[in-house]
Image (spheres, coloured by chain):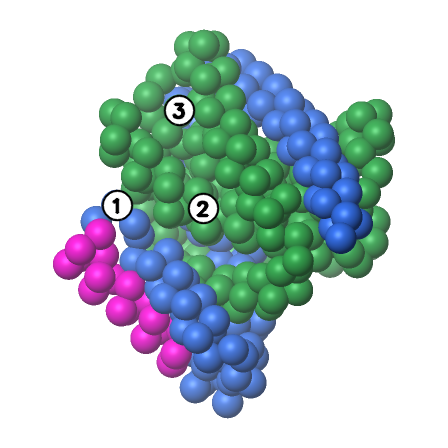
Amino acid sequence: MNMQWQGAWESVIHHPLFGIGITLGAYQLVLAAYEKTRWIFLQPVLASMLLVIGVLLSCGLSYAEYRKSTDILSILLGPATVALAVPLYLNLRRIRQLFWPIFTTLVIGGVFATALVVGLAWWFGAEHMVLMTLAPKSVTSPIAMLVAEQIGGVAALAAVFVLITGVIGAICGPALLNLLRVSSPEARGMALGMTAHAVGTSVALQESEECGAFAALAMSLMGVATAVFLPLAVTLVV
Amino acid sequence: MLLRGLTWLVLFQLLGTALNHLFVPVLPGPIIGLLLLLGFLVVRGQVSEPLSQAASGLLRYLPLLLVPPAVGVMVYAADIAADFWAIVGALVLSLLISMAFVGVLMQRLLKNHSHTEERP
């Protein structure tokens, strides 16, 4: 009898659908918990990731097996990245009159933010793989993950760095901007969206709609600029 | 409707993948697809209904799609532990400094911009 139970358990956890099942379950659990508590640490990806890792470790499953069973979800990441063009286009139309301030901030701020994180980590003694993974940390995870992999970093780590950045930005950002007397919604939105991507944008949306629109714009512009120029810069420098 | 939009997205991604192999190996296929679609939308001047449905549908579930790659962090636990303080220090410091920098810069530029607008 005992043997049969064990056999059933084994065939359940090694079924190709098991990975998708726990991913869907963990994600919805986290979403429901976030709806209830509004706790900023319950970022869907971060919290679901921890839950899934917990289940995998307790069942003794390897990441390779989990990855294989969730291939369907990973394949959809490509079209989802392409789909980012739609909100980007809608934002582009909205704020044409402020083109130069936005463009200048994006170029100077983007280069500064990327150079600063790599420089600091290098100074603190991080190794090459970690540096290449930190470089795209200011942009939304799909782009950061693609770019990190392209320039010799690790996609999974990039996702974690991106999330940490977003959460810190959301917690400290508004207070920091108040302290520096940055009061215009456009500037606050730019700062939140450019440095803290989607999490920053959600905070900006709570401040005002205008602030949120600028954050969304800054996030998508920073994402595309990073995707296009960071791999080029790395190829030229390294 | 949704399927037609999805087909467009897949088509642009595949086009991007082809261009990635042929001409620009530095840019990932999906990013080339994104740029192509953006160019297409700018030329066309509007977003069609199926495309906007498919895009917003996919983007709504973006966090879910990112969970499997994020779980891969379990393989790199040792690497993170080795560089833990360098990583955390660099992340926190660079975030605070660059957010302050971007906010102040944008505010300055906006002020200059509105001054030049007021002058005839």
Query: Which residue is under mark 1?
Result: B26
Q: Residues within 10 Å of mark 3 (few under 14, many from 20)?
A: many
Residue B117 position within the rendered picture, expressed as x and y whole percent measured from the top left = 74, 50
Please give the label number shown on residue A225.
2
Query: Which residue is under mark 3?
Result: A131
Residue A93 position within the rendered picture, expressed as x and y whole percent measured from the top left = 61, 66
Q: Colour of chain B?
A: blue
Q: Amino acid at mark 1?
A: Val
Label 1 close to label 3 by CB (< 8 Å): no
On the question of residue B11 being in view, the answer is yes
Which chain is home to disc 2? A
Check residue A126 for magenta coloring: no
Residue B35: quadrant of the picture: bottom left
Q: Amino acid at mark 2?
A: Ala
Report the residue at 25% width, 25% height from top.
A238
Residue bounds of the magenta highlight: B7-24
Q: Who is closer to the viewer here, A45 or A187?
A: A187
Report the residue at 56% width, 33% height from top.
A109
Q: Amino acid at mark 3?
A: Leu
